[in-house]
Amino acid sequence: MVKYIATTGFFDGVHRGHAAVLNRLKETGLSLNLPVCAVTFWPHPRMVLNSEPEKPKLLSSVEEKKQRIETLGIDRVIVIPFTEELADMSPKQFIADELVAKYNIAGLCVGYDHHIGKNRTGGFDTIKRICNDLGLYCEQVQPFLVDNKVISSQKIRKHLAEGNVEEANSMLGYTYTLSGTVVHGKKLGRIIGFPTANIEVNSLKLIPRDGVYAVRVDVNNRRNLKGMLYIGKKSGTDGSGKTFIEVNIFDFDGDIYSREISVGLEHFVRNNMIFDSIDDLQARIIKDKENIQKYFG
């Protein structure tokens, strides 16, 4: 049975800090002549352990997370179902009974602040002692800093909630993307000359601050199409209180209903506004398009 050097964590967003751990993991695997794997979890622990009625909003779905880890060159991604039984394991139980017994892990390469076991009681000193007792390799990766600041998923979520997509993207190391299925809407955009694709996004995905964004779009096997994205409610035309996510793709004409679409957010253009008339709305959208085209050069 193949042995692996592993790292563990939830890896929400697989940001540059996570990438630093995964890159060090690959180096360690090469030096020890062993393949490497990332052990991650789903669902989020807060969805299992907390009694909060509101589910946590995440930077990546489990599919997005797996794909991004694999893109970084990790040989295997293991997704362990996060349950109350798993959460109740001691650090030693988790390493010995879960990682070693089930997945043949021969060593661990973990982040500087990584904790395992019940109530996160197992910090690096505990992890190293357990690994030594079990004859496993163990290594700690130092924090990855940007402008002398440690990157975290929590900080990225905060930046997105404030509309600071450039800062969030810098920490992620890639463009934050909303993906989903194109669904039918009210078709108001088509009436005023700016047809939009309404996107049904995974309910767990974090939706950035309401407003208008400059975006790049992948749809129908076409990539990096420029466009403008609207996020927000439509109190004048919809009383549901639902947040709508709709994109106008520049210089594009095609039937994309029920198709999968990905929208990468690159720049926050403006806050949402209330307009006195359709003509005012149309004039503002024309101005938004001009500003976005200037942004893209």
Image: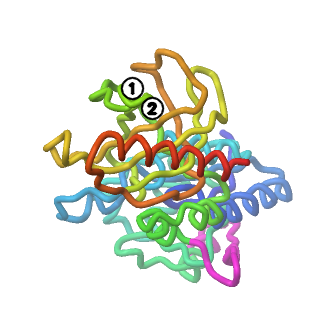
Crowding at mark 2 (Cα within 10 Å: few <14, some 14-19, many 20+): some
Left of 92 or right of it: where is 119?
left
Look at label 1 and name its amino acid.
Answer: Arg
- Rendered view: 138 above or below 26: below
Disc 2 is placed on an element classified as loop
Please state the extent of the stretch shown in magenta in the rendering.
Answer: 130-151
At 61% from the left and 60% from the top, the residue drawn is 169
At 39% from the left and 53% from the top, the residue drawn is 207
- Rendered view: 44 above or below 76: below
Q: Are marks 2 and 1 in contact (CB under 8 Å)?
A: yes
- Answer whether residue 216 is magenta in the image: no
Q: Is residue 78 visible?
A: no
Depth check: give the residue in front, 223 or 229. 229
- Rendered view: 242 above or below 122: above
Q: Quadrant of residue 199?
A: top left
Question: How many tags in the picture?
Answer: 2
- Answer whether residue 143 is magenta in the image: yes
Query: Disc 1 marks which residue?
Result: 190
Look at label 2 and name its amino acid.
Answer: Phe
Depth check: give the residue in front, 294 or 2. 294
Depth check: give the residue in front, 266 or 8. 266
